[in-house]
Amino acid sequence: MRRTTLAALCIAAATATVLTGCRSGSSDSSDGASRTAGTNASPAAKEKEKKEKEPFAGLTGGQIADRALTATTGASSLRLKGDVPDDESDGTITLDVALDKKGECAGSLSMNGQGRADLIKTGDTIYMKYDEAFLRAQSKGESKDTADAVVTMLAGKWTKTSATGKDAMDISGFCDLDTVLGGADEGSSAATRGRTTTVDGTPAIVLTEQDGKDRYTVYVATQGEPYLLRIDSASAGDPGTLAFSDYEKPVPAQKPSGKILDLDELG
């Protein structure tokens, strides 16, 4: 299962890379002018008032990205869902994981669309459950007897291991929101603001960022906290989509019920 822990590390790295590309080094600004009210306002004044009613009036795309990064990295918990590249397999990891700054997490992972692994980390213990398709995909290169033995022992069963163990450190880091978002508050941005839209029913503004051949489209909430809602990456190095939701909601990380196989005892 070493590839699984490395995959988790790739997720964290990809997330931080994409977020850093959206960071602004500029301070927020607005025109500071007073609104012109009343039906007798000039056309220019009416146009100005209309613009002031727009989301993030007077802010550049980079400044909006700055606000979004501040709000997102300041959240105590959130949910990540989407596809990110996995350098280990040259494939794609599909994830749906809730995590917080206390190091708790709960969700699922899939690699190259082959099977599913459920993940829970609570306290100092990591719990994982793999289906047969996931185990067989991870056992490529092994003999049939070995793969069959792994499937017989692990498929559909909850396992546990210490979060402080050497092979668990990558997943422990991925389950910590501060680690996943680490580095996202560095750098500068030349993001361009675009149209308004909705993401899963939440009003949002669209920002675009171009870095050479790499292109990112970022969706920022325009109501409430300016949280990141989605990032679409057209980068050759890390293409994919990440959706952000369930901000400040408790992470459902509880110890699984029933029999649990202790991997540390098995050595």
Image (cartoon, grey):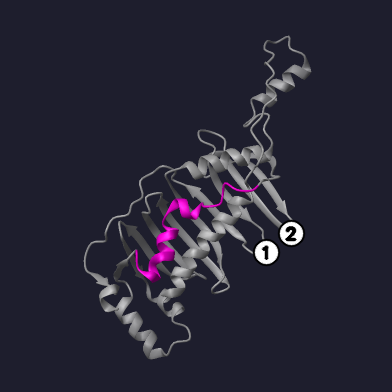
Q: Secondary structure at mark 2?
A: loop
Q: Is residue 241 above or below residue 193?
A: below
Q: Nearer the viewer, residue 44 or 212?
A: 212
Q: Secondary structure at mark 1?
A: loop
Q: Which residues are magenta?
A: 164-187
Q: Is residue 146 above or below residue 96?
A: below
Q: Are marks 2 and 1 in contact (CB under 8 Å)?
A: yes
Q: Is residue 206 left or right of residue 99?
A: right
Q: Is residue 252 left or right of residue 87?
A: left
Quarter of the image that includes the N terminus: bottom left
Is any atom of residue 73 visible in this view? yes
Mark carried by residue 213: 2
Res 260 quadrant in image: bottom left
First in residue order: circle 2 vs circle 1: 2
Residue at point 46%, 42% (across, down): 75
Q: Which residue is mark 1?
A: 236
Q: Is residue 89 magenta?
A: no
Q: Is residue 43 above or below residue 118?
A: above
Give the amino acid at mark 2.
Answer: Lys
- Measuring from the top left, give residue 264's x and y in whole percent: 29, 73
Give the amino acid at mark 1.
Answer: Ala
Q: Is residue 103 left or right of residue 25?
A: left
